[in-house]
Image (tube, rainbow, N blue to C red):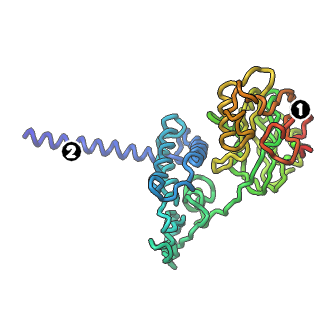
Amino acid sequence: MTLRIRSVLVLVLAGLLSFVASDARAAGKTCLTGTAPEVAGDPAQITALRQTIDATCDCASFDGSAGKKHGNYVRCANNAILTAVGANQLRPQCKSTVKQFYLDSTCGQNPKLHEVVCIKKTLANGKLGCSIKPTTRGDGVTPSDTCAPSPGKLDQVPCPGFVRCIDAADNNGDLRIAAPGDTGACNPILTPARLLLNEVSPNVANTHDRIELLAVTAGNTGGITVEQDIASPTVLATLPSIEVAAGDLIVVHLNPGPSDATTSETTSKDELPSSTFAWNFDAAWDVLGGTTGITYSDRVLVVRAADGHIQDAVPFIRSGIGAPPAGFVADLQAIQAAGLWLPASCGGKPCSNTTTPSATAVSVDWAGVGSTVTGKTAARTSATDTDTAADWAVGVSTLGVPNF
Ligand SMILES: [Ca+2]
Ligand SMILES: [Ca+2]
Ligand SMILES: [Ca+2]
């Protein structure tokens, strides 16, 4: 009798638990969907996390060897996901959504199988899917047709050049792979532009600071960020998708003000003309940055590619305010160690306030810049980028036009 009551209790409890569990699963489906107000923050949080993961877990370095297998890649991504959740930078409901981006990747897969991103469309219902499929057998040469279409039933398209399903198949950029927003075709492969920091106005009143970037190669700017500091970076701006030509200038308007446009130019340099928006430049791409300005002290500014690699880094100091703080010195040492700034050391030692030359002496001094949008700026003075302080000087603003 007692045993029977216990069994009933166990059954009831099990039922309750499974009810709670299915309820939790339902909550788990609300990432990017649903009407809860916090859902609106998901895309920005996921985008920021993807950049962190790309910078931390370099797909190309997971070559399928011991410790560098697909599982290691997914674990690397998942660690970053859990860290973000712990820091309230990702809602727990989004954990599995983001993890799936990295599960569905070629990173670390067996190199003999020549895996590829494969988009699948079921013709009967138009449903889209995407997975990673081998293009050869284990001998590395015999073709495998697992991503071939099945006439009348299945459209399948391989997307060579992509390492993740989400990058290849999410055509409308809503972070989900689904019809009708997505088509079942591979996204075009965009060549990223390479940008240099070209001119900076870091001390404009009301933090309407300006950063001019120079495209040294043609390509797309989508996802390129401008950041302040290395060890604990602040993202000042994330560039929209613009097809730029070599030599094009981009002016980033931080904390946009009363005479700035309210959107960025993406189709032409005079899309939002200065006749309407007085602070725009008709010969440059005007792009809106975030609401945080540059801290006008001793700071490293960085241009970071969408894949996480630093394209350009420049250490700026403001002479007259004393020796640089430890955070600046460490950031300077980091870009020197990465080969992004010269000299590589100060007399053979990491540059500091006590070395010869000092951390200050190898950095660009931006003291003397103006406090209006037309005031003096720090700018490159030569077309040759030597990654040294000698490339820069403070002078009359040439924002929106070539420096020399
Ligand atoms: Ca989509
Ligand atoms: Ca413009
Ligand atoms: Ca300029």
Q: Quadrant of the N terminus?
A: top left
Name which residue lies at 82% across and 34% down. Answer: 201
**Which of the two residues, 167 or 94, is positioned nearer the viewer here?**
167
User: Residue 387 appears at what percent x and percent y?
Assistant: 77, 42
What kind of residue is marked 2? Leu
Task: Calculate the distance from the C-alpha at mark 2 to the C-alpha at mark 1.
Answer: 76 Å
Judge by depth and name the residue closer to the eye, 27 or 377: 377
Q: Secondary structure at mark 1?
A: loop
Quadrant of the rendered image holding ligand 3: top right
Asked if the residue at label 2 sits under 8 Å from ligand 1, the reply is no
Badge count: 2
Residue at point 80% right, 21% down?
320
As shown in the figure, which amino acid type bears the numbered disc 1?
Answer: Lys
**Disc sitting over residue 151 in the figure:** none
Q: For this view, does 124 lie left or right of residue 258?
A: left
Q: Residue furthest left?
A: 1
User: Residue at left 78%, top 52%?
Assistant: 266
Q: Is residue 229 visible?
A: no
The correct choice, above or below, for 119 with respect to 193 in the image is: below
Pointer 2 residue: 11
Q: Residue at position x 49%, y 47% from top? A: 76
Residue 307 visible in the displayed image? yes
The answer to whether 378 appears left or right of 349 in the picture is right
Residue 116, x across and y down, in percent: 54, 66
Location of residue 151 with respect to 363 vertically, above or below: below
Give the side of residue 247 with respect to residue 344, left or right.
right
Residue 397: x and y in percent read 90, 36
Mark sitting on residue 376: 1
